[in-house]
Every structure is written in C-alpha cells, then in structure tokens.
Amino acid sequence: MTTTDHDPLSAPVTVILGDEHYANLKDALRAALIEIGARLLEQSWGVGGSQEIESFEVSIDNVLLTVEAETFRGLTLTGARPLVERIAEVVRRNRSHPTSPA
C-alpha cells in the first residue's frame, strides 16, 4: 500500500480579519496584497437577501488566495496557512502604522 504525505501547511485555512465594513481594514488588506505582489484573477459582488458579498481571488507566487467580505461574517482570507498568516501579519502592521496622505 502506498501512502502520500499530507502537508498540513498547504491545507486551506480561513482567517477572519475583522468586520467587513471597516474601510481602514480593507485599505490595509489592499496595501498588504500590493506589497506582497498579489495578482487579481477574479472578482465578484452580489446581494442575497440581507447579505452583501464581495469576493475576489488573487495569486501570489502561483498560490491562490480568496478574499471575501460578507455582511455577517466579516472580511476573510482563505488559502494556504503560511500565505494567509503572512498577509494577516502585514494587514495588522499596516493598521497599526497607517500611512497618511502626503
């Protein structure tokens, strides 16, 4: 019998960054994605009942990441654990030290 190793670091995880309606959180995420070199692949927006859902998929070094802003769930990142944790850390840093317009 052959077994394959399962790498827990490559298993997708979802992290909730915070409430989706915070503009500074979205700005911090946008800055983090630009800083890390994300490339937009797909984007969608929709309304279902009382929920508004915005979703986009990006590629960073050929690794896919999904970002969703959902009314009752918040702003989430889903993807491989190391990438999600890296982006979440950059978002936290960007929110702690926001850049001001020149």
Image: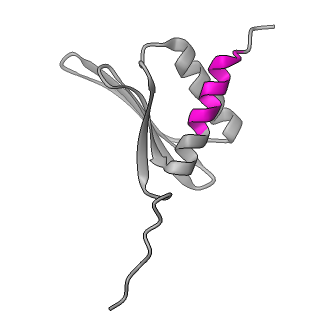
Q: Position of residue 94 (x, y in %)?
A: 66, 23
Q: Magenta span: helix, strand or loop, mainly?
A: helix
**Residue lying at 54% horizontally and 19% vertically, measured from the top left:** 25
**Residue lying at 21% horizontally and 15% vertically, measured from the top left:** 50
In the drawing, does residue 80 fall left or right of residue 14? Answer: right
In the drawing, does residue 24 fall left or right of residue 14? Answer: right
User: Of all residues shown, which one is farthest toward the right?
Assistant: 102
The span picked out in magenta is 87-98
Q: Which one is nearer the viewer's eye here, 6 or 36?
A: 6
Q: Which one is nearer the viewer's eye here, 88 or 56?
A: 88
Q: Which one is nearer the viewer's eye here, 43 or 28?
A: 28
Q: Position of residue 37 (x, y in %)?
A: 68, 41
Q: Would you say residue 65 is visible in this rendering?
A: yes
Q: Position of residue 59 (x, y in %)?
A: 56, 48
Quadrant of the drawing holding the C terminus: top right
Q: Would you say residue 30 is visible in this rendering?
A: no
User: Of all residues shown, which one is farthest toward the left?
Assistant: 49
Quadrant of res 99: top right
Does the magenta segment cover residue 82? no
Quadrant of res 71: top left
In this rendering, is residue 97 above or below 44?
Answer: above
Q: Position of residue 35 (x, y in %)?
A: 70, 35
In the drawing, does residue 42 fall left or right of residue 62? Answer: left
**Residue lying at 49% horizontally and 45% vertically, measured from the top left:** 65
Quadrant of the drawing holding the N terminus: bottom left
